[in-house]
């Protein structure tokens, strides 16, 4: 099942994507929670109820007629792991960046979250804006001290992510958070594909284009630390909640390695097999009133 947020005629709601149409959840199951995070928090039985209601749903819309929004704008956490693909770690090492001996985690502040087709803004205080194609994971149940063997049980689903980064801000501080958290630098979507539809999240093709030029391409099997190892590690430290987001790392050929930073007018597209794609135009940061 593909859980989405969409806007049509100035109304934003939750929908279920089916082919080239989106089914309105509020009319298919009026008693359902009104946000994707609330659906996940209410328990897996709600996903079963939603699935059962779809065949008789009275209202659907063409995907082409709606605006898809960030599926989880109210996430409490947006965690991301650095240098988690073998080829990206190798290109970083060639540039003199030491490869971490353990999982390297940082926050993307949740205020950076934006929609799958919304603009991403070049900050007025940075000229080194970069892209990073990543697969995202959504936590589906409250958990702590999760074993690697059980980690798959707490995953609600997966999404496409671009871990947009201001490299100059990333490297001027001992921690990455500032360089990773500029407003609009967390486009996610286009929807949440539930875990039951993804046979093996470690065997999906991931690609990124800038203005139609293929820049990044990898299989998610190229991760150094698996999704299950990542969840195990994080859950030793913090309670993970339904709707929490995890970005699982990027592959080689980021902009800084190629000497190609993003500029206003560029269009960045990220696609992951079975999960869809997001596409964001780079714009200059608007003036603040």
Image: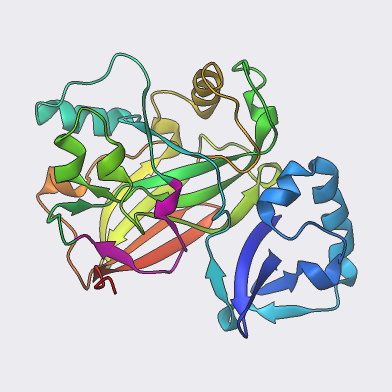
Identify the coloring. rainbow
Quick check: 40 above or below 155? Answer: below
Please state the horizontal and vertical placement of residue 240, each as a whole percent of the image.
Answer: 60, 30
Task: Give the left or right position of residue 216, taking residue 91 as reference.
Answer: right
Quick check: 122 above or below 22? Answer: above
Q: Nearer the viewer, residue 45 or 149?
A: 45
Please state the horizontal and vertical placement of residue 17, each as a whole percent of the image.
Answer: 67, 66
Task: Give the left or right position of residue 139, taking residue 55 as reference.
Answer: left
Quick check: 237 above or below 244? Answer: above
Residue 107 seen anywhere in this rendered image of the structure: yes
Q: Nearer the viewer, residue 270 or 234?
A: 234
Residue at 73%, 42% in the rendered image: 41
Segment colored magenta:
110-123
Q: Nearer the viewer, residue 188 or 18?
A: 188
Task: Give the left or right position of residue 67, taking residue 52 as reference.
Answer: left
Residue 272 among those drawn in magenta? no
Q: Nearer the viewer, residue 148 or 5?
A: 5
Residue at 56%, 21% in the rendered image: 235
Q: Quadrant of the N terminus?
A: bottom right
Residue at 66%, 49% in the rendered image: 37
Task: Give the left or right position of residue 209, taking residue 203 as reference.
Answer: left
Please state the horizontal and vertical placement of residue 213, each as a whole percent of the image.
Answer: 24, 63
Please state the horizontal and vertical placement of residue 38, each as a whole percent of the image.
Answer: 72, 50
Residue 18 seen anywhere in this rendered image of the structure: no
Classify residue 224 by image quadrant: top left
Q: Quadrant of the C terminus?
A: bottom left
């Amino acid at each position: 099942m593909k859980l989405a947020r969409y806007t049509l005629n100035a109304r934003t709601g939750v929908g279920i994507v089916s082919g080239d149409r989106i089914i309105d959840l509020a009319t298919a199951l009026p008693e359902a929670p009104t946000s994707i995070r609330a659906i996940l928090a209410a328990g897996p039985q709600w996903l079963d109820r939603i699935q059962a209601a779809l065949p008789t749903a009275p209202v659907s819309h063409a995907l082409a007629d709606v605006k898809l929004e960030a599926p989880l704008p109210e996430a409490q956490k947006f965690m991301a792991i650095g240098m988690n693909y073998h080829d990206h770690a190798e290109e970083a090492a060639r540039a003199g960046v030491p490869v971490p001996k353990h999982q390297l985690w940082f926050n993307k502040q949740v205020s950076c979250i934006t929609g799958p087709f919304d603009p991403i803004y070049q900050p007025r205080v940075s000229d080194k804006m970069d892209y990073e194609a990543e697969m995202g994971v959504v936590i589906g149940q409250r958990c702590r001290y999760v074993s690697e063997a059980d980690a798959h049980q707490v995953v609600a689903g997966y999404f496409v992510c671009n871990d947009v980064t201001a490299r100059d801000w990333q490297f001027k501080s001992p921690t990455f958070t500032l360089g990773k958290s500029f407003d609009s630098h967390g486009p996610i979507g286009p929807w949440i594909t539930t875990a039951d539809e993804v046979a093996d999240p470690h065997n999906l093709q991931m690609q990124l284009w800038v203005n139609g030029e293929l820049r990044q391409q990898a299989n998610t099997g190229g991760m150094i630390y698996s999704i299950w190892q990542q969840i195990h590690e994080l859950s030793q430290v913090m309670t993970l909640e339904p709707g929490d987001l995890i970005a699982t790392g990027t592959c080689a050929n980021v902009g800084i390695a190629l000497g190609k930073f993003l500029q206003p007018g560029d269009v960045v597209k990220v696609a992951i097999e079975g999960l869809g794609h997001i596409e964001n135009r780079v714009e200059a940061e608007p003036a603040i009133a």
